[in-house]
Image (tube, rainbow, N blue to C red):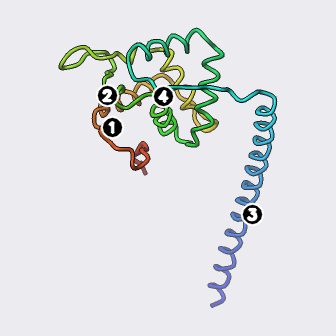
Amino acid sequence: MRKEIEHISIRLGRVEKKVGISLATLETVKDGMIMDDGVSESENSSSPEPSLDFKRISNEEEFTEFDAKLGSDAEYYANVKKWLTKQIHETDPDNRMLVAMDLIMERTFFAECTWTGAGSPGRKIAFGIRTNVLRFFRDIGSSKVASLNEKIVTNFFRKKLNHAKRRAKIQGTRKSVCHKIRRT
């Protein structure tokens, strides 16, 4: 009986130590979030709200114009990025890019695109050559938690382009998210 009490006492000490560490970590994270909120509030107050009247891309001409404007106009790039960042509340990079994709492009238009531009019934819209759009999505998908590279963005769009026709038929009754296979 005495050994059991000693064993339980030792385990209780370990649990208390872990709880103490967790509380200290939580306080640190909370303080960091409060500081970040203060910084973002001061940034918001100093810079005016971008008045962006963005219409979803629905054809190849609009897509080409959007890509060119992202590459040539830094202010437009920053305004679109700020507009999207305010609307995206996801932390996962794939989900961030998916929400941005749905906000920027019509699903029916996205179904007309392929990575290379080749298609079985005829020529389609090449997505892989739009370097400014890909760079933009890399920036949108990146966050404080994760930073993306070209390969991740390329794989994301190749997956989405493969399933674009099916996504175009979805009614939108349920919010779409990227599913990750958890490896243990």
In three-dimensional space, the C-alpha distance between marks 4 and 3, rounded to whole angstroms, equals 46 Å
**Category of crowding for the residue at label 4, using alpha-carbon neighbours closer than 10 angstroms: few (below 14), some (14–19), many (at least 20):** some
Mark on residue 104? 4
Q: Which of marks 2 and 3 is in front?
A: 2
**Category of crowding for the residue at label 3, using alpha-carbon neighbours closer than 10 angstroms: few (below 14), some (14–19), many (at least 20):** few
Task: Pick whichever of labels 1 and 4 is earlier in the sequence.
Answer: 4
- On the image, which quarter does residue 54 sit in? top right
| Residue at position x 28%, y 33% in the image | 165
Q: Nearer the viewer, residue 9 or 107?
A: 107
Task: Pick whichever of labels 4 and 2 is earlier in the sequence.
Answer: 4
Is residue 90 toward the left or the right of residue 46 in the image?
Answer: left
**Category of crowding for the residue at label 2, using alpha-carbon neighbours closer than 10 angstroms: few (below 14), some (14–19), many (at least 20):** many
Task: Give the amino acid type for the residue marked by disc 2 in the picture.
Answer: Ala
Residue sitting farthest toward the bottom:
1
Is residue 20 toward the left or the right of residue 71 in the image?
Answer: right
Task: Pick whichever of labels 1 and 3 is earlier in the sequence.
Answer: 3
Q: Nearer the viewer, mark 1 or mark 3?
A: 1
| Residue at position x 54%, y 32% in the image | 141
Task: Give the amino acid type for the residue marked by disc 4 in the picture.
Answer: Ile
- On the image, which quarter does residue 108 sit in? top left
Residue 24 sits above or below residue 85 on the image: below
Dot 4 lies on which element?
helix
Dot 2 lies on which element?
loop
**Category of crowding for the residue at label 1, using alpha-carbon neighbours closer than 10 angstroms: few (below 14), some (14–19), many (at least 20):** some
Q: Quadrant of the N terminus?
A: bottom right
In three-dimensional space, the C-alpha distance between marks 2 and 1, rounded to whole angstroms, equals 8 Å
Q: Mark 2 points at which residue?
A: 111
Image marks 2 and 1: residues in contact by CB distance under 8 Å: yes
Task: Give the amino acid type for the residue marked by disc 1 in the picture.
Answer: Arg
Dot 3 lies on which element?
helix
